[in-house]
Image: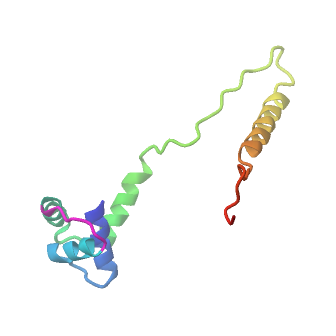
Amino acid sequence: MKVVAAYLLAVLGGNNTPSADDIKEILGSVGIEADEDRIESFLSEVKGKDIVELIAAGKEKLASVPSGGGGAVAVAAAPGGGGGGAAPAAEVKKEEKVEEKEESDDDMGFSLFD
């Protein structure tokens, strides 16, 4: 990812075809040791390709990748069929209140500016 980021920074800076030395210079400017093999491998993959087209193709591929997320909440139906909708809503409200209490900022006996 470091090599890709350095390559993209070079492209954003106006160099449409960054060389290995350009990437090494960018990585070195922030104290990262450049891996020669990874740089050469990456440059061979993107040689002769437009970076905008590569990014667009990558976005299309990522659209089909499952990204996890919060997941669905399973709620058991109330016996007898009716009136089951109010109970889950009440449970959610209770959980939110608990979270608010946990997130309170206690000074733990000291202040940041003491």
Residue occupying image coordinates x 32% and y 83%: 13
Extreme-top residue of the structure: 80
Apparent side of residue 1 relative to residue 102 in the rendered image (left or right):
left
Residue 57 seen: yes
Q: Does the magenta-highlighted stretch encompass residue 34?
A: yes
- Which x, y percent locates residue 70? 59, 40
Residue occupying image coordinates x 69% and y 64%: 114
Residue occupying image coordinates x 34% and y 61%: 57
Above or below, 104 relative to 49: above
In front of the other: 102 or 52: 102
- Which x, y percent locates residue 83? 87, 25
Above or below, 43 relative to 60: below
In front of the other: 59 or 12: 12
Apparent side of residue 47 relative to residue 75 in the rendered image (left or right):
left
Which quarter shows the N terminus? bottom left
- Which x, y percent locates residue 78? 80, 19
Image color mode: rainbow
Residue occupying image coordinates x 35% and y 65%: 55
Above or below, 20 relative to 36: below
Above or below, 109 relative to 76: below
- Magenta residues span 30-36
Q: Main secondary structure of the magenta part?
A: loop
In front of the other: 24 or 64: 24
